[in-house]
């Protein structure tokens, strides 16, 4: 078997998982000047879809390049707190 058939780059001995890691690195380098950082709405949308558990591969790869990890963590904490507060409020309303 040749190196390309084994899932390794022909130029080096480092494995490339179906070319995904390499393509993301190339996309990040090539598209950094043309792509913009995701805003608040896009970050909230990505976090809400992750709460639901449904993410498309293409959207996930795009978000991996565009989203700021700190904003994703802060948005996740804020939306989780809002969800818990909403449930507590709903339970208090139903019980009273």
Image (cartoon, rainbow, N blue to C red):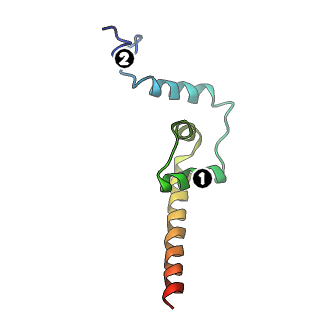
The mark found on residue 70 in the picture is none
Image coordinates of residue 96 in percent, x first then y, are 51, 91
Q: Furthest-left residue in view?
A: 1
The answer to whether residue 25 is above or below residue 73 is above
The answer to whether residue 84 is above or below residue 2 is below
Q: Nearer the viewer, mark 1 or mark 2?
A: 1
Image coordinates of residue 26 in percent, x first then y, are 54, 24
The image quadrant that residue 10 belongs to is top left
The mark found on residue 45 in the picture is 1
Quadrant of the frame with the N terminus: top left
The image quadrant that residue 33 belongs to is top right
The answer to whether residue 6 is above or below residue 57 is above
Q: In terms of sequence position, does the residue under pointer 1 or pointer 2 come before the other? A: 2
Query: What residue sits 45% from the left and 28% below the top?
Result: 21
Q: Are marks 1 and 2 in contact (CB under 8 Å)?
A: no
Image coordinates of residue 19 in percent, x first then y, are 45, 23
Label 1 secondary element:
helix
Query: What residue sits 40% from the left and 15% below the top?
Result: 9
Q: Which residue occupies the foreground of this view, 55 or 32? A: 55
Q: Furthest-top residue in view?
A: 2
Mark 1 → mark 2, Cα distance in angstroms: 35 Å
Query: What residue sits 63% from the left and 31% below the top?
Result: 32
**Which residue matches tag 2?**
8
Q: Assess disc 2: are there few (<14), some (14-19) or many (≥20) residues with their C-alpha within 10 Å of its C-alpha.
A: some
The answer to whether residue 94 is above or below residue 83 is below
Image coordinates of residue 60 in percent, x first then y, are 52, 40
Q: How many marks?
A: 2
Q: Furthest-bottom residue in view?
A: 96
Label 2 secondary element:
loop
- Is 49 left, or right, of 19 in this rendering? right
Q: Which residue occupies the foreground of this view, 14 or 92? A: 92
Q: Assess disc 1: are there few (<14), some (14-19) or many (≥20) residues with their C-alpha within 10 Å of its C-alpha.
A: few
């Amino acid at each position: 078997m040749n190196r390309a058939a084994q899932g390794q780059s022909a130029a080096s001995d480092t494995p490339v998982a179906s070319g995904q890691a390499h393509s993301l690195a190339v996309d990040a380098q090539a598209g950094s000047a043309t792509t913009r950082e995701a805003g608040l709405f896009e970050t909230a949308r990505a976090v809400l879809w992750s709460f639901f558990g449904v993410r498309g591969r293409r959207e996930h790869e795009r978000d991996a390049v565009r989203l700021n990890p700190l904003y994703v963590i802060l948005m996740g904490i804020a939306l989780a707190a809002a969800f818990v507060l909403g449930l507590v409020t709903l339970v208090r309303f139903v019980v009273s």
